Amino acid sequence: MNERNERIFGVACTFRKPADVFHAAEKVRDAGWTRWDVHTPFPIHGMDQAMGLPRSKVPRLTLLGGVTGFITGCLLTWYMNSYDYPLIVGGKPYWSAIYPFPVLYECTILFAAFGTFFGQFILNRLPHHHHPLFELPNFARVSDDTFMVVLEAQDPKFHVDDSRNFLQSLGGQEITVIRD
Amino acid sequence: MSDSSSKLTSKWTTILGLGVIALVAAWALAFLGLGQHDHRPALSVLLGCLFWTSLLIGMLMLTMITRVFDAGWAPVIRRNWEFMIGALPVVLLLGVVPLAFLTDFRHLLWEWTDVKHILPSGHEVGHDPILQAKSWFLNEKFFLVRISLYVVFFSVLTWAMRTWSFKQDTDRTASHTHTLHAFSAAGIPLGAVALTMLAFDCLMALSYHWFSTMYGVWFFALSIRLALAATVILTYRLSNGGWLDGILNQAHRHVLGCLMLAFTVFWAYISFSQYFLIYTANIPEETFWYNIREFDPVTGLKSDWWGVSMYLIFGFFLLPFLALLFYRSKIVPGRLLTIAVIIFIGGIVDLLFNAVPRQILDKTAPEGFTVSPFLCGGLATDLLAIAGFGAIVIGLFLRSATKAETIPVHDPRILESINYHE
């Protein structure tokens, strides 16, 4: 890669219709791109498959959080009521899985929510205060009436001129090189 | 209707006939039990009836809920619920109604209706102060009035949900959807009251000393779980050589799987909360209900009902819960079917757990009573009655499918439903 390429974020290309951007996405996917994205004003059904996106990994972090929370709740109630300061309340045992169940349950929910929230935060690489696409003069139109495919320079297949030609062959309208 | 579908519906007379034979056998055993003063075979008929009542009430509630929320995914599946719920009045009339109105059966099952019945304490029911305090509600006349009202109420509601929906097939009037929306909006709260009272009268009153305000909610949770499990099993069959061939898609299975997961958690929440409150309060008139479901009163050791309760926790809650957490369990047909079968079987066991154990007078036992066991001949008659009522329900379902379009072709949301997407 030469010095000029290092400052390039990627190549953006606009489309007028949902069907056009949908089929363009399928071709980009089939060409084997990994670092690229599609921007649309509304969710397009089937776009996940058209882009070849795998399912989100957030649910696994939710499960991990939930299991951690359940174990934390067990340890918490066992340590406090049975180990550190054994106390009989209402004739119940020092520790059983029944009387502290609301605690175990609430800890599970709380930690599962933490897992979900912080999991998506990390997987989405947040916080992210600025993005090179915001420099694009017509980027605001992708929340109105324009559809956009962006090929990023970090993809091993990326080469400015080839990528421009590739997007042109997909029927793209306006093609812009985005600089970092 | 395609060839495979009409082949399916033509079997309705055979299936209905088998159901009638099984039910006659179950009733014959109930009459034999009457002679020996054995309540167990009569209880089997009641449980067979209530199992399908519960399942069909669940389907009725789902029909009304999807109407009220204008669910776009629902129409192709809801039509099958409409076919099913037509059997609800029949199930009630063949089971709980004769059991309640025939005095001998009523006295045998609902002991509080028989003032001469001897309690384990040695007193007659008529002199029981606990019953006397409840007698404004638990008296024979009011009981029979309520049983009749359930039949009338559920007949009218199921008739309404079917009639206007089927009318839409022929007259193509979109306003029927609004009519059904209004019926459902009124039907949901009234149905909630009716199913709660039905659970109180038919199940909770089998053990009239005990009371739980969560019992109706438990019955509702069980109803919806059974209805969803039956829907998954039914739609699986109908999409393999039936009228849902090529129509039922991955997104429909996903939504049914998500609902099964939600109501699995809801059932556990309700069942545990009921246990937890009674365990914490530790009041004898409530705890005895769980004690007879854990200990054998003669030996003082854990009875087979303890094993059943462990099965309910791990087999009816934990296993389906963990399995349904995974996305692929909800979309791969075979896996979803397996989970639905697990829930369906668990639902039978849960109903038995709630209804069967009761104190049976026995002067030789140390506490003056024994508890009916789980594993006994009664279990076989339970399954016979459940199979009998089930075959009648399926027979009537297939008969209904010949009376209207199997897909609601003129429902305003039919295209949305057929093209439903995750």
Image: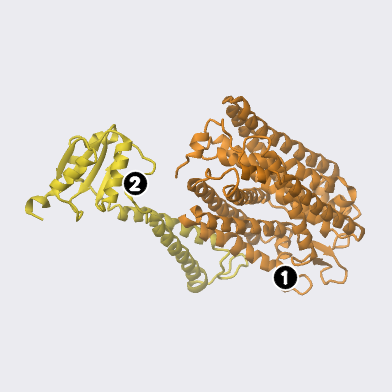
Chain colours: A yellow, B orange
Q: Is residue B294 visible?
A: no
Q: Secondary structure at mark 2?
A: helix
Q: Mark 2 vs mark 1: same chain?
A: no
Q: Quadrant of the C terminus of chain B?
A: top left
**Callout 2, which amino acid?**
Ala
Residue A35: x and y in percent read 24, 52
- At label 2, counting other C-alpha atoms closer than 10 Å, the crowd grade (few under 14, some 14-19, many 20 or more) is some
Dividing the picture into quarters, in which one does residue A140 lie?
top left
Chain letter of disc 1? B
Residue at image location 68% in from the left, 60% down from the top: B349
Quick check: A60 above or below B238?
Answer: below
Q: Position of residue A33 (x, y in %)?
A: 25, 52
Distance from Cα at disc 2 to Cα at disc 1: 58 Å
Q: Which mark is residue A136?
A: none
**Residue holding disc 1:** B303
Residue type marked 1: Ser
Check disc 1 and report its element: helix, strand or loop. Answer: loop
Residue B64 appears in the rendering: yes
Q: Residue at x 75, y 50 (%)?
A: B389
Q: Taking B351 as reference, is A75 above or below it?
A: below
Disc marking residue A50: 2
